[in-house]
Image (cartoon, rainbow, N blue to C red):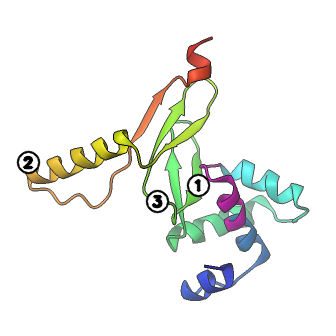
Amino acid sequence: MNATTIFKENEIKKTLARTTILDILKKIKKPIDVGEIIERLKSMKIKVDRVTVFRNINLLVKKGLINKVEFNEGKYRYELASLPHHHHLVCTKCGSINDIESNPLHDQIDKLSKTANKIYDFKIEEHKIEFFGKCKTCKSK
């Protein structure tokens, strides 16, 4: 779906900054913070102040187009909401972030969710799981 359609369906005015923020997140495919978004906008010669970037990101979060994630760093990161449901592996040494998508671990997490639902008679509407540790490169150092 193109940006014009996305903005029209969500009743958002299409602007260069908003379109570019979505494009950046689409290309990166990993959660990034506002500072990284601003740097990428600058490198693309798009002049936009920090407040405007924050305002646009908050609007895109409110409309459900991007998700806000937090990895105990004291800041938020953002990723497209249209990505398939996934979890993250976060390296506490180098800061790398890897997605856990469709694989046996993800399947086990889904089973856990269904089991909790059944045992506690609790309708789980959403869950977020992040694993913190050392990536392959950092643990071998």
Instruction: Examine the rendered structure and indicate whether residue 120 appears above or below residue 3.
Output: above
The earlier-in-sequence mark between 1 and 3 is 1
Which tag is nearer the camera, tag 1 or tag 3? 3
Report the front residue among 103 and 131.
Answer: 103
Q: How many residues crowd mark 2 within 10 Å: few (<14), some (14–19), many (20+)?
A: few
31 left or right, relative to 106: right
Say which residue label 2 marks: 119
Q: Label 2's element?
A: helix
Magenta span main SS: helix
Q: Label 3's element?
A: loop
Q: Amino acid at mark 2?
A: Ile
Q: Amino acid at mark 1?
A: Tyr
Q: Position of residue 59 (x, y in %)?
A: 59, 71
Report the front residue among 105 and 63.
Answer: 105
Label disc, if present, on residue 84 of the rendered structure: 3
Label disc, if present, on residue 136 of the rendered structure: none
Q: Label 2 vs label 3: CA separation?
A: 26 Å
Q: Amino acid at mark 3?
A: Pro
- Residue 60 makes an appearance in the image: yes
Instruction: Examine the rendered structure and indicate whether residue 14 appears above or below residue 83.
Output: below
Rendered residue at 65%/61% (across/down) = 26
Q: Quadrant of the C terminus?
A: top right
- In the orientation shown, which residue stands out farthest toward the right? 45
Say which residue label 1 marks: 78
- Boundaries of the magenta span: 22-32
Q: Quadrant of residue 54?
A: bottom right
